[in-house]
Image: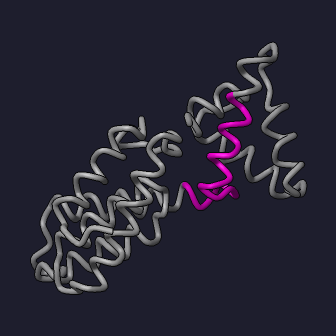
Amino acid sequence: MSSNLDELEATLREGMKLSQQPSMGRRAPASAAVPHLSKARAGLRQYVKDHPDEARAFRLLSLAEETLLGYKLAIAALERAIALSGGAEKIDKKDAKRLAMLKETGEEWAELPITPEQLRELGGYLKEKLESEPVERNLRWTEAWLRARGFDDDALRRAREAFDDRGAFSDMQVFYNVVRG
């Protein structure tokens, strides 16, 4: 694992490029991006342990966590970067906007009762179904996948509401509007 922050940033940027995520309204990263993003995140986590006073490293870690949909950790890392850069009194406008966006988006993702790993698995399942079965305008495959993983009626209802909030009213829309992996 590299201790060079520039190399870690390059790995993170490559993963972000492969992730097929927009900067706003993130979805689960594309499968090809996950190894790069995971490697960058692991390296950045170690780097900040070894260099606890480097704001740039915490900003990059925040970005890695966000790209992997770890919003609580992304917020914590950005807050640490802000503290290292002079705190709330001297907060940069860019950091303030990003922190507000992370908090808002984190709340939205918290409503979805599915982990990022489960979301990637669901994406693979839906991709296979969408390529091999006739497409219907419902959540038949999504709900079947959730039920097979032990989601009860309450969790299914919450998932459906969260999908609705993201404009995903069918399996195809779940794949393209939420998963896209």
**Is 62 a magenta residue?**
no
Q: Nearer the viewer, residue 34 or 56?
A: 34
Residue located 75% across and 44% down the image: 160
**Is 114 a magenta residue?**
yes
Task: Give, as a single range, the part of the protein colored magenta.
Answer: 109-127
Q: Nearer the viewer, residue 2 or 41?
A: 2
Judged left or right of residue 135, residue 3 is left
Name the quarter where the N terminus is drawn: bottom left
Judged left or right of residue 181, residue 162 is right
The percent position of residue 112, horizontal first and vertical second, equals 65, 54
The percent position of residue 16, horizontal first and vertical second, equals 34, 45
Image position of 144 with respect to 96: above or below: above
Image position of 8 with respect to 45: above or below: above
The percent position of residue 158, horizontal first and vertical second, equals 75, 53
Colouring style = one colour
The percent position of residue 154, horizontal first and vertical second, equals 85, 58
